[in-house]
């Protein structure tokens, strides 16, 4: 990057940050956890644990605007 | 501006997620829960006469569960926000990381909360047909994916125009128009919300719940963006060196 670019210039170019695949995997895991917490209506997991998770997060699911039964 | 590392962004993202989760769960407790209580009263009136069904999870546990869910989801979404921020930081407009982080969180709010809330508004418990939940979930998730893609397109349009030498206001306007037109288009294309609202649920209750739900989502995203932005903002230099600098300048 040229050093004469003043730091206060409007919309200055900033150096890109290297984001390895591992970071994206973390993001995907975070999205899957959100899905299991909020979307799960028997699509992935079933049984007593899923039922408990569904009822435990039920208020949260509705409050966050997620479709529910 | 000091060097910003991925690890640094992720750590700040996690903290922003905790702050956003606390803010959202406070709104959940004080604003959303009272409306849920009204909805449960409707459900109870419906079941009057029938033998009381065995509750798997008690009411108090569900209130706590709703707050825990808001916290956990906020932390997850903030980690996603941090990874995306690291990836697209150099494409985002703004003079500071605070501006860039809050803009990205705003786009996150629009894509993950506002567009889905306008197309498929939140409903309280006591509303909803179990037979349609699969279809409603697919519509909701695909709409979010499409809205996120539109947000990305809007950022890209602005960046390409700037790179081609167009003025900043023109590029910004084109980006905003791309976003607004794109969101409107996908909302028209996606199937209409299922009209599953039972007749015994008052319209006022539905409306109050939708406003309360959007308030919780807005609190979550606003706190997430502002906290990430603040944590990325370099601390001002201490007073002593600044005085020395001023003396040198004078
Ligand atoms: Zn449910």
Image (cartoon, coloured by chain):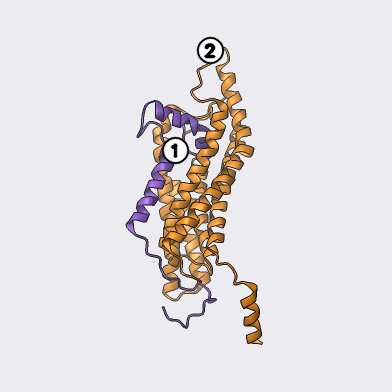
Chain colours: A purple, B orange
Q: Where in the figure is residue B226, as x and y percent of width and height?
A: 57, 57
Q: Which residue is mark 2?
A: B51
Image side of residue B40 versus residue B3, left or right = right
Residue at 42% across, 56% down: B83
Foreground residue among B120 and B92 = B92
Q: Where in the figure is residue B224, as x and y percent of width and height?
A: 54, 53
Residue at 49% across, 58% down: B104
Circle 1 chain:
A
Image side of residue A44 versus residue B242, left or right = left
Q: Quadrant of the C terminus of chain B?
A: bottom right
Task: Specify the label residue B10 is tagged with.
Answer: none
Foreground residue among A26 and A68 = A26
Q: Is mark 2 within 8 Å of ligand 1?
A: no
- The answer to whether residue B247 is above or below residue A23 is below
For residue B115, say whether it is visible.
yes
Which quadrant of the structure image shows residue B102?
A: bottom right
Furthest residue in direction left, as rendered: A21
Q: Where in the figure is residue B205, as x and y percent of width and height?
A: 61, 32
Residue at 61% across, 24% down: B41
Local SS, label 2: loop
Residue at 54% across, 76% down: A8
Circle 2 chain:
B
């Amino acid at each position: 990057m040229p050093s004469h670019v003043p730091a206060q210039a409007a919309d200055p170019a900033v150096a890109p940050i290297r984001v390895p695949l591992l970071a994206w995997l973390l993001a995907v895991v975070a999205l899957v956890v959100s899905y299991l917490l909020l979307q799960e209506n028997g699509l992935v997991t079933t049984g007593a644990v899923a039922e408990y998770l569904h009822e435990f997060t039920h208020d949260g699911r509705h409050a966050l605007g997620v479709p529910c039964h | 501006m000091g060097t910003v590392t991925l690890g640094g962004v992720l750590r700040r993202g996690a903290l922003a997620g905790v702050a956003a989760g606390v803010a959202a769960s406070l709104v959940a407790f004080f604003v959303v829960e009272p409306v849920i209580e009204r909805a449960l009263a409707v459900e109870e009136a419906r079941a009057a006469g029938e033998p009381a069904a065995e509750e798997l999870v008690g009411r108090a546990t569900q209130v706590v569960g709703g707050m825990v869910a808001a916290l956990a989801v906020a932390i997850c979404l903030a980690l996603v926000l941090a990874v995306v921020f690291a990836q697209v930081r150099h494409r985002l407009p703004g003079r500071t990381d605070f501006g860039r982080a809050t803009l990205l969180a705003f786009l996150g709010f629009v894509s993950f909360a506002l567009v889905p809330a306008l197309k498929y508004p939140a409903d309280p418990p006591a509303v909803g047909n179990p037979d349609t939940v699969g279809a409603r979930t697919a519509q909701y998730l695909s709409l979010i994916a499409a809205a996120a893609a539109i947000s990305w397109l809007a950022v890209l349009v602005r960046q390409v125009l700037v790179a081609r030498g167009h003025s900043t206001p023109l590029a910004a306007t084109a980006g905003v128009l791309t976003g607004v037109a794109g969101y409107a288009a996908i909302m028209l294309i996606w199937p209409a919300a299922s009209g599953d609202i039972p007749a015994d649920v008052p319209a006022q209750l539905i409306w109050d719940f939708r406003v309360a739900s959007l308030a919780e989502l807005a609190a979550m995203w606003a706190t997430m963006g502002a906290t990430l932005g603040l944590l990325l903002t370099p601390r001002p230099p201490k007073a002593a060196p600044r005085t020395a600098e001023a003396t040198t300048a004078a």
